[in-house]
Image (spheres, grey):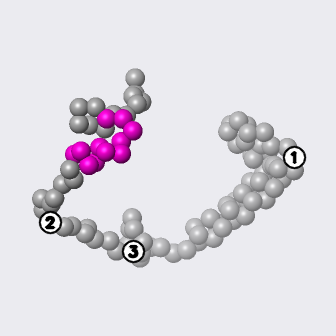
């Protein structure tokens, strides 16, 4: 599959990008190479390959939920730039 300069210009227009002729030529060559590589990948026989979502095996790493020491509230708030009623005070970010 190959791509034309007109197709590159069309996609650039859809993306609201301005490409001059030199840039369009460069992108045409680069996209043509990418599509050629994808064509090569499409030729690979993957009939007997199991579908996976991960390339390596993964497993959950779980730990026991144990109550631990907590930080002292006053110590935690001691360096806070703003605090109010024992809580961190932050600027409102949602209307």
Q: Is residue 9 left or right of residue 70?
A: right
Sequence order check, earlier mark of 2 and 1? 1
Q: Residues within 10 Å of mark 2 (few under 14, many from 20)?
A: few
Looking at the rendered structure, the secondary structure element under dot 1 is helix
Q: Which residue is mark 3?
A: 56
Find residue 43 and name its label.
none
Q: Disc 3 and disc 2: Cα gap in Å?
A: 26 Å
Point 20% across, 50% down: residue? 72
- Residue 50 included in the magenta stretch of the image: no
Residues marked 1 and 3 touching at CB (< 8 Å): no
Question: Vertically, is 67 above or below 80?
Answer: below
Question: Vertically, is 18 above or below 25?
Answer: above
Q: Which residue is mark 2?
A: 64
Residue 16 position within the rendered picture, expressed as x and y whole percent measured from the top left:
71, 36
Residue 12 position within the rendered picture, expressed as x and y whole percent measured from the top left:
73, 42
Q: Disc 1 and disc 3: Cα gap in Å?
A: 44 Å
Location of residue 92 by image quarter: top left
Question: What range is drawn magenta here?
Answer: 73-83
**How many marks overall?**
3
Q: Quadrant of the N terminus?
A: bottom right
Looking at the rendered image, the disc whose residue lies closer to the viewer, 3 or 2, is: 2
Point 36% across, 35% down: residue? 82
Point 36% across, 45% down: residue? 79
Point 62% across, 65% down: residue? 38
Sequence order check, earlier mark of 1 and 3? 1
Residue 37 position within the rendered picture, expressed as x and y whole percent measured from the top left:
66, 67
Looking at the rendered image, the disc whose residue lies closer to the viewer, 2 or 1, is: 2
Q: Disc 2 and disc 1: Cα gap in Å?
A: 62 Å
Sequence order check, earlier mark of 3 and 2? 3
Looking at the rendered structure, the secondary structure element under dot 3 is loop
Q: Which residue is mark 1?
A: 21
Q: Residues within 10 Å of mark 1 (few under 14, many from 20)?
A: few
């Amino acid at each position: 599959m190959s791509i034309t300069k007109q197709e590159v210009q069309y996609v650039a227009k859809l993306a609201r990008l301005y490409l001059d002729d030199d840039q369009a030529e460069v992108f045409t060559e680069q996209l043509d190479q990418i599509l050629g590589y994808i064509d090569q990948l499409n030729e690979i026989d993957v009939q007997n390959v199991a579908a996976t979502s991960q390339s390596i095996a993964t497993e959950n790493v779980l730990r026991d939920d144990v109550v631990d020491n907590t930080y002292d509230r006053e110590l935690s708030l001691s360096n806070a730039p703003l605090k109010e009623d024992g809580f961190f005070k932050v600027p409102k970010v949602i209307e």
